Image (tube, rainbow, N blue to C red):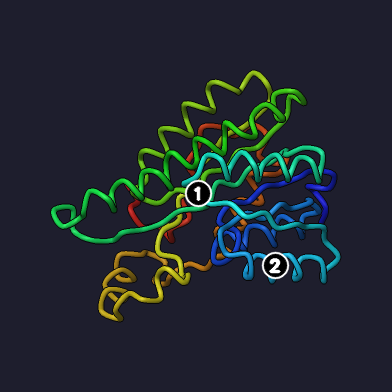
Amino acid sequence: MSELKEHVVLVTGASQGIGRACAIALAQAGAKVALAARNQEKLAEAVNEIKAAGGEAAAFKMDVASEDEIKASVKAAIDQFGKIDILVNNAGITRDTLLMRMKRADWGSVIATNLTGAHLCIQAVISSMLKQRWGRIINITSIFGQMVIGLTMAVAREVASRNITVNAVAPGFIETAMTESLSPELKETAIKMIPLGRTGSDQDVANAVRFLASDAASYITGHVLNVNGGMLMG
């Protein structure tokens, strides 16, 4: 399959979990992949895996809480690959706790990374997409990520006339490094809320991202694709 041949993808938070799976899936679809994250060692491992399979990839150090690092990494990726056609905004952090117990600093960190970081990444790549009148922006949110969903719809409306689609993927309970630390009791409770009766995998999310990045999804924009096993069905 090479539906994304000649396209260049930037995936943030690509060193592990969902981001890594998305990068590999998009490389398998024929895209050249710029992998961005803070952990350079894990990034290098993912890049080597893509190259070993015959793909083209490169690693770029990026902390999405830093506007300077976002600008520098995007510039470096464009310098190397010539453009960025597809952005997968995946980098995010969690500070799971009760609202009344969440510290102001933790709240600030979540907003800076998950919302402001996504906004700054879009800003950094959008001129490249506007010039060529083609692009795909895919924001990985969560089943509770209404702020990112709002950003997705606002940008989708703004750039639709330039043949740039902007969508969100909302994962439910996905088995990743971030969920490994949860107690067995909490996991069991969560699974009972999922109609399909199981947790999802990072590959399930990557498959959704690959579809939205392809021309098969060219008439879909401003949409939130739930990948949650039926959790929160209306």
Q: Secondary structure at mark 2?
A: helix
Q: Residue at x 26, y 72 (%)?
A: 189
Residue hosting label 1: 140
Question: Is 1 on the left-hand or right-hand side of 35?
Answer: right
Q: Residue at x 52, y 39 (%)?
A: 67
Report the amino acid beneath label 1. Ile
Judged by depth in the image, the label closer to the viewer, 1 or 2, is 2
Report the amino acid beneath label 2. Ala
Outermost residue, left side: 100
Q: Secondary structure at mark 1?
A: strand
Question: Is 194 on the left-hand or right-hand side of 151?
Answer: left
Residue hosting label 2: 44
Outermost residue, bottom side: 184
Earlier sequence position, callout 1 versus callout 2: 2
- Where residue 190 appears, x then y in whole percent? 30, 68
Q: Residue at x 76, y 65 (%)?
A: 50
Q: Nearer the viewer, residue 34 or 88?
A: 34
How many marks the image carries: the answer is 2
- Check contact, mark 1 vs mark 2: CB within 8 A: no
- Where residue 212 appears, x then y in whole percent? 63, 44
Per the model, the C-alpha gap separating discs 1 and 2 is 22 Å
Q: Quadrant of residue 133?
A: top right
Label ID, residue 124? none
Q: Quadrant of residue 124?
A: top right
Outermost residue, front side: 68
- Where residue 196 appears, x then y in whole percent? 42, 67
- Where residue 57 appears, x then y in whole percent? 77, 57
Question: Is 138 on the left-hand or right-hand side of 152?
Answer: right
Q: Is residue 39 above or below residue 70?
A: below
Q: Residue at x 70, y 29 (%)?
A: 129
